[in-house]
């Protein structure tokens, strides 16, 4: 059931049912562990007693011998005990015969499967000769004939109680030659032509869980076998993987596979899969043998369905046979459907076919339902019920749903149901067969971790010796109404309905809040809806209503109304319901307050328009600035020859099409034979930067040409920037005067990157004299430095756009410039500034770049 019954609040009892359920589950698990331990201990004591009776040894010696045999045979101690007791057929040998007489075939199991596993599978050793001699150690066992193998397998399958037993017996008999199987699977066909894993051996629990259900889709070899009724032989994993989804992780684990149809009553009802690690095709004799095995399985599966009851040994329930898979005897009793927990023995429990059929019906039910099997005490009293089938909508207090409930106890899932009216109703129905229909009662259910109280009615009917229990919730309508109210409140919308024939008007409560009307004022007629519409919106809205009431055109219209809180933007959606003659008789729709959305949209539109206007202004400013820059700073079309120097100039604007920078240069001959060089950078962009650049460029040239010293020129330029009226600008600058007589360059700098000298293939930055940014302080100090230029030298003056990149230290950019200059300017000749710039500048250049290459040709020596 979905929830746990609780007492009335007046009783003051409110148990924590979830915690109680977990306690019951833990106690049950501990009880089963102790029961298993006790049964295992009994097997060990019986085996020790047998060895003590045969050899006269002590109990300690018998335990030691069993342990030695298990270790030598790579078996568990419990397995060795069952071998000693004769439950697993073995070749006859005297007490304490070394275990080497048992042949071991490697067992391929899933490494990811939990629980204990066996590293070897036991195959009976060769039978003794006529004289009772055991074959010598190392002798290869004789391959059994197909007739003998089928005879032994038929005898072993006689007592099979379920498909799982059939699969395990198949693997035990087919593991050796000539088949050499490593895994066996049995898929049963459902009514919807899908497949359910009915039994398996050798594949491991993880792979079995993954392939529990196979939908009716393409690319599955087992489905092809069932549909066509023909065997499918897969002998090339790489090629087979292109056509089929192969079982296993990785799929190449089993190199060859065979899928054979199992026919019952003229219809293919199952598929038998044989998986091998053998990397060789199936021989004709092996194929014929496996076809016979498939026919043999059909009879065994029918027998298993007809006799699902527990197998009994000496009048007591006992192990059906050794499963060879887990180190403990396999419990007898009916088997659960594929993918469900194995069911414990219950003499009065339902048959496997019945439970599987009920589960198949439950799987398509829209509501909750469970199948309960009574668990009785030795005296015959019902102590609990076991859940043998559950619909997908069935949920217990711990959040387990659907098939996860199968195999659990009612008192484990719903602890407080014991002693309640529901429990007594179950017992009456089980005894009398009269269906139980309880009165509605309150349940406390757990939904997403939260407790919610709901009202349910429970119904129970008898099915054989079991009960089918269903329940119905009575508060679905109220819950739907609450969800609808939450939807209207969160979406700020409400629904409306006008009956044009009777004049009846129905509004949801949220409509009054949207229109800012008192609930007691009543709804508005359609011709007055939605209220005081703004005059500029009224004509369009009126036309929309006329089309709605005329040709019946649906309305989806935005309209503004005036309320006590101001103007509101509403979205009105409505449609007309016509009669048989096409005349509208009813109008229904909804109204939504979209004021916040429309306000945001209008604000976004205004911002977009402002941005476009600002962009146009910036574009116009750039055009003017670019033209002004071109007029004030013309770029030479070729190299300049100044004295004995050759000067190349490069100027690259940034990729930002809205900004013009303040980078500039100057190179001219002065009266008296000297040459003036200058490279500067004004902070900022646009018209102001271009204007400041023009001031600095022409003022610097004028002062130096008229005889001012270099440091004196920097002081005056600094004063000029400090006293600029409109804005306070800053700039960097390198200023130098070259004397051709002694080939010396005297230079000063104001916060600018140092020049780079390339001589004899090595690049080195000049040590800068003292200097500070122009416009930064009233009392700056500037020093001078001298550099002698030799024939073949290149001296680079540049702005910071050449070396600076966002997020990078300036030293990295300077090193990059030095390496590129050594490569491009080391050979004698003018070099190529275009190639140098292509190596240095990124794809997205973010700043202007100005570069001067001052070169003294080697021929001047």
Image: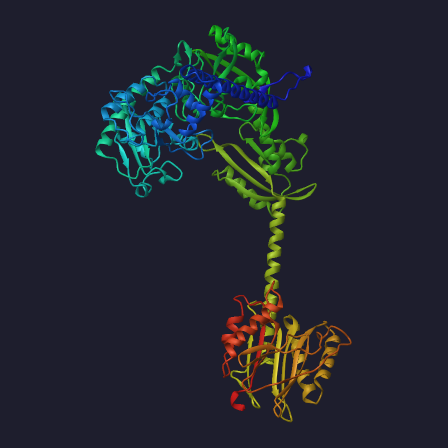
The residue sitting at 49% across, 81% down in the picture is 827
Q: Residue furthest front?
A: 56
Give the camera-side residue of 608 and 781: 781
Q: Taking 260 as reference, is 463 above or below it?
A: above
Q: Is residue 315 above or below residue 142?
A: above
- Residue plotted at (28% across, 31% down): 140
Q: Is residue 422 above or below residue 598?
A: above
Q: In the rendered image, is residue 247 in sight?
A: yes
Give the image quarter of residue 445: top right
Return the x and y of residue 646 as percentages of the image width and height. Answer: 54, 86
Q: How many marks?
A: 0
| Residue ID at (59%, 86%) | 789
Counting from the top left corner in percent of width and height, residue 50 is at 42, 16
Between 572 and 435, the one lying in front of the other is 435
Which quadrant is the C terminus positioned in? bottom right
Question: Do we see residue 847 in this rendering?
Answer: no
Q: Position of residue 610 (x, y in %)?
A: 62, 59
Above or below residue 805? Residue 598 is above
Residue 700 position in % (x across, y down) = 68, 83
Left-right relation of 161 to 468 = left
Residue 104: quarter of image: top left
Frontmost residue, 423 versus 378:
378
Left or right, 742 with respect to 342, comes to right
Q: Residue at x 54, y 85 (%)?
A: 792
């Amino acid at each position: 059931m979905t929830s746990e019954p609780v007492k009335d609040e007046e009783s003051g009892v409110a148990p924590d049912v979830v915690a109680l359920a977990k306690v019951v589950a833990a106690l049950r698990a501990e009880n089963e562990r102790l029961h298993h331990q006790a049964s295992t201990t009994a097997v060990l004591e019986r085996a020790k007693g047998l060895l003590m009776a045969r050899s006269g040894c002590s109990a300690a010696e018998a335990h030691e011998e069993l342990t030695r045999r298990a270790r030598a045979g790579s078996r568990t101690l419990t397995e060795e005990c069952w071998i000693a007791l004769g439950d697993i057929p073995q070749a006859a040998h005297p007490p304490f015969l070394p275990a080497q007489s048992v042949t071991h075939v490697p067992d391929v199991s899933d490494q990811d499967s939990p629980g204990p596993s066996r590293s070897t599978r036991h195959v009976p050793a060769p039978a003794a000769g006529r004289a009772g001699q055991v074959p010598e150690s190392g002798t290869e066992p004789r391959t059994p004939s197909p007739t003998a193998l089928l005879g032994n397998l038929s005898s072993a399958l006689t007592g099979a109680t379920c498909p799982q037993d059939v699969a395990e017996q198949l693997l035990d008999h087919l593991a050796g030659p000539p088949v050499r199987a490593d895994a066996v699977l049995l898929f049963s066909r459902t009514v919807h032509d899908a497949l359910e894993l009915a039994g398996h051996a050798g594949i491991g629990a993880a792979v079995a869980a993954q392939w529990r259900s196979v939908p009716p889709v393409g690319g599955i070899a087992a489905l092809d076998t069932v549909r066509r009724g023909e065997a499918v032989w897969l002998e090339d994993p790489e090629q087979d993987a292109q056509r089929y989804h192969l079982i296993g992780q990785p799929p190449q684990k089993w190199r060859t596979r065979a899928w054979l149809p199992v026919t019952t009553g003229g219809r293919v009802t199952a598929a038998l899969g044989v998986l091998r690690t053998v990397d060789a095709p199936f021989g004709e004799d092996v194929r014929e043998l496996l076809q016979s095995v498939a026919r043999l399985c059909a009879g065994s599966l029918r027998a298993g369905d007809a006799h699902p009851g527990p197998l009994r040994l000496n009048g007591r329930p006992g192990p059906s046979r050794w499963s060879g898979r887990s180190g403990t005897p396999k419990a007898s009793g009916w088997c659960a459907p594929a993918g469900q927990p194995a069911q414990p023995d219950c003499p009065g429990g339902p048959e496997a076919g019945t439970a599987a059929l009920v589960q198949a019906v439950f799987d398509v039910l829209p509501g909750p339902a469970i199948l309960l099997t009574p668990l009785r005490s030795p005296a015959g009293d019902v102590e609990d019920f076991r859940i043998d089938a559950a619909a997908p909508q069935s949920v217990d207090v711990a959040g387990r749903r659907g098939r996860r409930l199968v195999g659990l106890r009612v008192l484990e899932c719903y602890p407080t149901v014991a002693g309640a009216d529901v429990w007594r109703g179950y017992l009456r129905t089980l005894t009398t067969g009269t269906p139980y229909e309880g009165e509605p009662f309150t349940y406390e259910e757990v939904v997403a971790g939260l407790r919610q109280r709901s009202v349910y009615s429970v119904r129970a009917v008898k099915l054989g010796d079991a009960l089918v229990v269903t329940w119905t919730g009575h508060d679905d309508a109220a819950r739907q109404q609450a969800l609808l109210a939450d939807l209207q409140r969160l979406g700020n919308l409400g629904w409306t309905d006008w009956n044009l024939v009777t004049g009846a008007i129905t509004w949801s409560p949220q409509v009054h809040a949207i229109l800012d009307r008192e609930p007691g004022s009543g709804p508005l007629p359609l011709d007055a809806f939605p209220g005081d519409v703004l005059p500029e919106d009224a004509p369009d809205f009126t036309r929309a209503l006329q089309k709605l009431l005329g040709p019946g055109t649906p309305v989806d219209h935005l309209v503004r109304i005036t309320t006590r809180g101001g103007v509101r933007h509403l979205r009105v959606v409505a449609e007309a319901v016509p009669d048989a003659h096409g005349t509208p008789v009813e109008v229904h729709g909804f109204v939504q307050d979209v004021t916040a959305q429309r306000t945001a949209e209008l604000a976004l539109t205004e911002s977009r328009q402002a941005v476009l206007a600002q962009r146009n202004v910036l574009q116009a400013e750039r055009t003017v600035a670019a033209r002004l820059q071109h007029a004030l700073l013309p770029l030479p079309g070729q190299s300049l020859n100044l004295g004995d120097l050759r000067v190349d100039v490069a100027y690259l604007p940034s990729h930002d099409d809205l900004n013009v920078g303040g980078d500039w240069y100057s190179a001219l001959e002065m009266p008296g034979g000297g040459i003036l060089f200058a490279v500067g950078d004004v902070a900022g962009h646009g018209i102001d930067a271009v204007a400041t650049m023009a001031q600095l460029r022409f003022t610097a040239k004028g002062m130096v040409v008229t005889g001012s010293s270099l440091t004196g020129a920097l002081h005056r330029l600094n004063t000029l920037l400090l006293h600029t009226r409109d804005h306070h600008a800053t700039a960097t600058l390198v200023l130098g005067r070259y004397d051709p007589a002694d080939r010396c360059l005297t230079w000063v700098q104001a916060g600018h990157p140092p020049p780079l000298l390339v001589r004899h293939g090595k690049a080195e930055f000049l040590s800068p004299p003292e200097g500070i940014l122009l416009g930064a302080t009233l009392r700056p100090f500037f020093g001078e430095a001298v550099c002698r230029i030799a024939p073949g030298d290149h001296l680079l003056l540049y702005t910071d756009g050449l070396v600076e990149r966002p997020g990078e230290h300036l030293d990295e950019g300077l090193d990059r410039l030095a390496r590129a200059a050594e490569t491009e300017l080391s050979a004698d000749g003018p070099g190529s500034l275009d190639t140098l710039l292509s190596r240095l500048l990124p794809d997205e250049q973010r700043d202007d770049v100005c570069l001067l290459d001052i070169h003294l040709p080697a021929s001047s020596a």
